[in-house]
Amino acid sequence: MIPSDRIVEARIGEEARRARVRGLPVLLARKPGQVRATGVLGVRFGSCDREFVEGPGGAPTRVPDGVAHFLEHKLFEGRTVPVFQRYAELGAACNAATSFRTTHYYFTCTDHFETCLAFLLDFVQNPSITPERVEKEKGIIEQEIRMYLDNPGWRVFFNLLGALYERHPVRNPPGGTVDSVRSITAEDCLRCHRAFYRPGNLVLVAAGDFDPEALLSRIEGWVAGWEGPEGAALPVSEEGEVRTREVEEKMTISRPRVLLGFRSDGGPGPGEALIREDLAGGFALEALFGRSSEVFQDLYRRGVIDESFSASATVETDFAFTVLGGETSEPARFREELLVTLERAKREGIRPEDFERVRRRHVGSAVRRYQSSESTAMGHLREALRGLPPFAHVRALEEARLEEAQEWLRRLFRPDRLAVSVLLPA
Amino acid sequence: MPAFERLRVGEGIFLHRLPVDRFKSVTCRVVFHLPLTPRAAEAALLPPLLRRGTRFHPDLVSIGRRLDDLYGAALDGDVSRVGERQVLDLAVDVVAPRHLPERADVLAEGLEFLRELLLEPRLEDGRFPADVFEQERENLARVVEGLLDDRISYATERCLARMCEGEPYANYPYGTPETIRAAGNEAVVARHRSILRSAPADMFVVGPAEPAVVEAQARTLAEALGTRRVETPPEPVPPPDRPRRRFDEEMDIDQAKLVLGFRVARRSGPEEDPGLALFTTLLGGGPFSKLFRKVREERSLAYYASASLERPKGLLVVQAGIDPGKEEEVTELCLAQVEALRRGEIDDAEMVAGKRALRTRLRGLDDSPSGLIAYAVERALLGRSPLPSDEEAAVAAAGPGAVVEAAGRVWLDTVFLLHPGGKRKA
């Protein structure tokens, strides 16, 4: 039997089984009565990890932008049968996503769960990447990149990141550019796979109505012989002023869109520091700009913002930025009003009663996150990839302190760390 | 999954209870059935207006705080098009008390608040406050104008509007920017009253809820609605018999969007129609489908190519993202796939994958409260069972003959292309 810890979150009515199977961290969440089951395999390797060392003591190497996403596509091609097709034959749905620092592969099924899970481990472990297959994929990825270029939300967001950052690869869309994708080789993909797709750098999470003990020993058979040295991404830290204060573009859209972005200097680092930074930002933004805030009501009532408005903080180990914005008919006024509001919030701080209201709201949504197998698995994956124990988020919510949110707000608002991205109707 | 328990609580008002203990929250949705007319905007303005203030919670802040106090109860309201009806709904979702730190009575309080939102809007001299009304009217008009920004949905909606000209279905459920901006304050108040007085209504409550609390709340709602004279919306009009038509529109986009609008002759009555569901799935419901394999994979003619069904209206829509010069080639190739299914060219692997995909989708609904409710609303219009499991059993028993029969009821009515103009080859 494989040793495992059982972690219980009694109030939410959830438990997770945590183990390490041949070096692979595994987390299993049993969901009694649930019809759907999900399996997800995540890797700490994303679009920002373009410079790395292949193994301990290796020389730094660099790959073209978009390799992580390209590799995701290639793994999905499978060795003999396309992954999509294999899952479809099992009646399951599957997908994958590449983000800045991670990539994950997942499926959802109602039947044949073990077959689906074994296949997940198989296709992610065993690439079959040849120069011919790489060339064939380039056309498909180019189409995907072009489809995103037609998406106004995507354009205004990546224009903003390009203004906030000079060097950090977060400024590039995860798919890369048409040109960078054209330069990708099979060897680039294989090198990244060798360096990062190693048990210790991955996390496997499954949620569904299964027997965790029995499943653990099955998993052991599916990850046999999958060792090797782990590569390490070279962190990039960008500090100082933003690259460009303002960026503007025109395209066929119905109304202007404006995003204000504030860049932090570097990031908070891993683990607990990361989750605290994440929560501090989330609480501060929700207290200030959430639907029940006076600021939201005032700006909404005066027609400065509408339902499209959102405010969110993105935090990773070596970078962090906060984005506020939405659609507006008056881009200049929108920006002025938001800046005045932030200035005032920084001066006056967050009221304790607002902070506690946000906590109650977050407590409710934390429970909802464990409703479905999919969201349960994704929540566990996010924590595990960050090196945190299961339910860390639920516990951190109880410990969140007003002072941290205040402090976050004071650090955030710095005029020389601000960039504005505007998208105007052509 | 137990069946919905259906209870008549008032004139034209039914309570549908589904007490599923494993859900973490309770979803309560009140649905009104309205005819879909050129005056759709008047009802469409209600969900945003009702959420702006009630007699006792007069503004966004007080409503937001009430929801926060209920541990982040989620409020949701919208109109949608189901067949030739405009369906108006307002819903509240509360976390099950057993998962909350203090066992607050969030269910009864949440249902009471839902009733307050529905029945007691904040009015001044019998009208919505002028500034609130004008603002929500403008916001909704902009949301509809914003459809332009989502190229795929925009192309589909344009296709359906041209295809169903003169039929109620051509009315967009939110109205047009012009009809929204022309809607009068008194007319919307009057529409609100007439809906409460005469529209057939269903109240759905799904999740771990005390049956007695739910029934008492439903009866209170029914009493508050008073004496009603219920007017059931008319039945859908039969589709016109005419030659295939083609429309196109120019937009500054990279990838052209092709939409093929098919009509489906209706089979009414309580018996299931598994052939049609299977036909749609085998045509374009996943990576095993003919559109995906023949159009995307084999010929690389599209980035996406899929088929979807609007059952209550008898429509089937094929969507593909294509190179602007390839319209005729792709259209013919899509039609060839429909023909292949009509001839019964279905191999075992396709049939197994198609059935499994449908089974996964239908069984998977059992994990989603809002999915179960949406399914029940649609099925009620077809006069069929509100439970996915009944359709699933019919699909499992269906053979290729059912697909061939359904394919014989499907014909291409309208071709629509959204394209980049000058770049298009003649």
Image: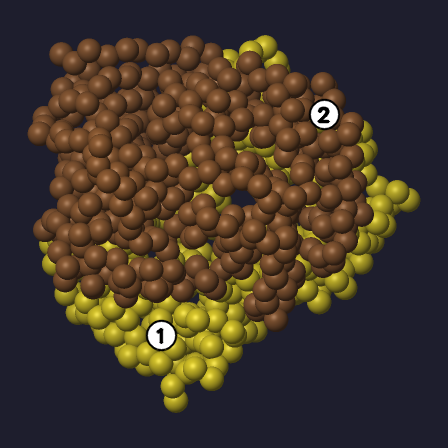
Chain colours: A brown, B yellow
Amino acid on which the number 2 mark rests in the picture: Ile
Query: Quick check: A365 left or right of A271?
Result: right
Q: Residue furthest bottom?
A: B426
Q: Is residue B187 above or below residue A23?
A: below
Are the residues tagged 1 and 2 within 8 Å (C-beta)?
Answer: no
Looking at the image, which residue sits at the far right? B125
Q: Residue A61 occupies which quadrant of the picture?
A: top left
- The residue drawn where x is 35% and y is 38% is A234
The answer to whether residue A149 is above or below residue A51 is: below
**Label of residue B222 in the image:** none
Name the residue at 51% across, 74% down: B252
Pointer 2 local density, CA inside 10 Å: few below 14, some 14–19, many at least 20: many
Q: Which residue position is annotated with label 1?
A: B323
User: Is A347 above or below relative to B202?
Assistant: above
* Residue receiving disc 2: A350
Q: Position of residue B338 (x, y in %)?
A: 25, 69
Please name the residue shown 50% across and 50% down the image. Answer: A166
Q: How many marks?
A: 2
Left or right of B35 in this view: B59: right
Left or right, B197 with reference to A312: right
State whether residue A360 is above or below residue A50. Answer: above
**Where is the N terminus of chain A found, in terms of image quarters?**
top left
Label 1 crowd (10 A; few <14 / some 14-19 / many >=20): many
